[in-house]
Image (cartoon, rainbow, N blue to C red):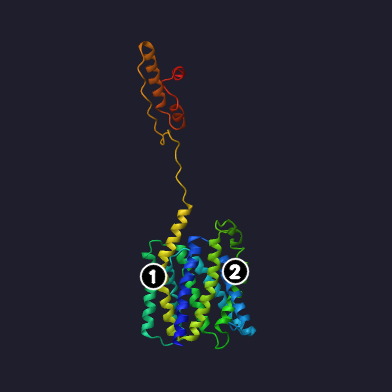
């Protein structure tokens, strides 16, 4: 039993890390910033895999009453807000910043339990909530890549997470299982995001995405859908096998690797993408000056007698006329030899 718990916990940590890195790669490196389509794709894959697992007997989905389904609809709406705002925030913020702000949702839950439910809260839990709030409050002042839009969507995300968990805890026991709730979330998200893709402009803007037909983009999107499903499944198994304290410890253990690994992997992939888009610098044709300054003309050769003096005077007048000219005229005149008889006649 202990071995099984450890295996489920390690699976959860692996899926958690891989899911965040894959999503960050698609959103920040490939810059696929169309959240209605990206999250709609992920929920569609998750819903299909969950339905297939139910048909094969690998997961149990109970037939719920209509009242239970209608009661859960506000939570499904909050779930859409979680994934949409989270996608917008993760595309603009680093993973450590995003996870730090995501943890502030626990402050909302703790405050609701203390103020509205009048539940007893241990001093250690209150102190941890205050430390989380202080850490999140210091982030904007110490973030060298501060993005107001990213923080705005992160705040919406954490409020949706807090409200979702409060509604989840307020449900009647045995009304809906975790799998039932997630199945309804998938169905509601696919329908709502599909309708929202047209008003937001994502449906037609995606046609201009430069990596739309690249195999790396297709593979990353498929991986994000499968990893999201396995992350959900492992988290449900984790909650069913362990106590709430042990489950929270595994979630806490899964977050530091995601914070440390982001710089290495995503930074390398971003550098690789930049190298592929670089173009060699344009070279000037040989023999032509690169600036706008007048080219140095060769000194006239001394001719014998009157013809040499005449050539020298004409060359001096020609050089004075070029002193206020720049650009292509200089380059054209530069190509003519001042020693030729033709050049002397033109002058």
| Mark 1, secondary structure of its residue | helix
In front of the other: 266 or 322:
266
Tell me, for residue 31, which label it has, or none.
Answer: none
Q: Is residue 89 visible?
A: no
Res 227 visible:
yes
User: On the rendered image, what quadrant is the C terminus found in?
Assistant: top left
Q: Quadrant of residue 318?
A: top left
Q: Position of residue 190 (x, y in %)?
A: 61, 71
Q: Residue at x 61, y 83 (%)?
A: 57
Q: Who is closer to the viewer here, 212 or 83? A: 212
Of the image marks 2 and 1, the number of the one nearer the N terminus: 1
The structure residue drawn at horizontal position 50% and vertical position 65%, both measured from the top left corner, is 88
How many residues crowd around disc 2 within 10 Å: few (fewer than 14), some, or many (20 or more)? many
Q: Quadrant of residue 343?
A: top left
Q: Is residue 152 above or below residue 301?
A: below
The reply to whether discs 2 and 1 touch (Cβ–Cβ < 8 Å) is no
Camera-nearest label, 2 or 1: 2
Q: Which residue is mark 1?
A: 137
Element at badge 2? helix
Residue carrying label 2 = 193
User: Residue 281: x percent and y percent?
Assistant: 44, 45
x, y (%) of residue 288? 43, 33
Taking the image as shown, residue 20 lies to the left or right of residue 308, namely right
Most extreme residue toward the top is 305
User: Where 321 sits versus 118, above or below?
Assistant: above
Residue lying at 43% horizontally and 68% vertically, measured from the top left: 95
Where is residue 138? Give x, y as percent. Answer: 37, 69
Crowd band around label 1 with a 10 angstrom C-alpha radius: few (<14), some (14–19), many (20+): few
Above or below 194: residue 181: below
Looking at the image, the residue that sits furthest to the front is 3
- Cα distance between the residues tagged 2 and 1: 32 Å
């Amino acid at each position: 039993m202990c071995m099984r718990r450890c295996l489920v916990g390690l699976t959860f940590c692996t899926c958690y890390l891989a899911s965040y890195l894959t999503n960050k790669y698609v959103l920040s490196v490939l810059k696929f910033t169309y959240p209605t389509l990206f999250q709609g794709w992920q929920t569609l894959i998750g819903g299909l895999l969950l339905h297939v697992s139910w048909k094969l007997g690998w997961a149990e989905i109970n037939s719920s009453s209509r009242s239970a389904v209608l009661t859960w609809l506000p939570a499904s709406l909050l779930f859409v807000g979680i994934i949409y705002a989270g996608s917008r925030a993760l595309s603009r913020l680093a993973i450590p910043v995003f996870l730090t702000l995501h943890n502030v949702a626990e402050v909302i839950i703790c405050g609701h339990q203390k103020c509205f439910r009048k539940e007893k809260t241990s001093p250690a839990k209150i102190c941890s909530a205050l430390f989380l709030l202080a850490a999140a409050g210091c982030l904007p002042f110490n973030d060298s890549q501060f993005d107001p839009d990213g923080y705005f969507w992160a705040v919406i995300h954490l409020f949706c997470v807090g409200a979702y968990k409060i509604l989840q805890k307020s449900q009647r026991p045995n009304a809906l299982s975790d799998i039932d709730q997630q199945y309804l979330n998938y169905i509601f998200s696919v329908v709502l995001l599909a309708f929202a893709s047209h008003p937001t402009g994502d449906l037609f803007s995606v046609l201009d995405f430069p990596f739309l037909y690249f195999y790396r983009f297709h593979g990353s999107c498929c991986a994000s859908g499968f990893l999201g499903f396995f992350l959900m499944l492992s988290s449900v198994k984790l909650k069913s096998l362990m106590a709430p304290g042990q489950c929270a410890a595994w979630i806490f253990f899964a977050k530091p690797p995601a914070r440390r690994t982001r710089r290495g992997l995503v930074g390398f992939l971003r550098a690789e993408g930049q190298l592929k888009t670089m173009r060699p610098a344009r070279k000037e044709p040989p023999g032509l000056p690169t600036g706008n300054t007048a080219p140095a003309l060769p000194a006239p050769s001394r001719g014998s007698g009157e013809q040499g003096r005449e050539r020298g005077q004409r060359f001096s007048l020609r050089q004075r006329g070029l002193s206020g000219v720049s650009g292509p005229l200089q380059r054209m005149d530069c190509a003519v030899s001042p020693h030729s008889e033709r050049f002397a006649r033109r002058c």
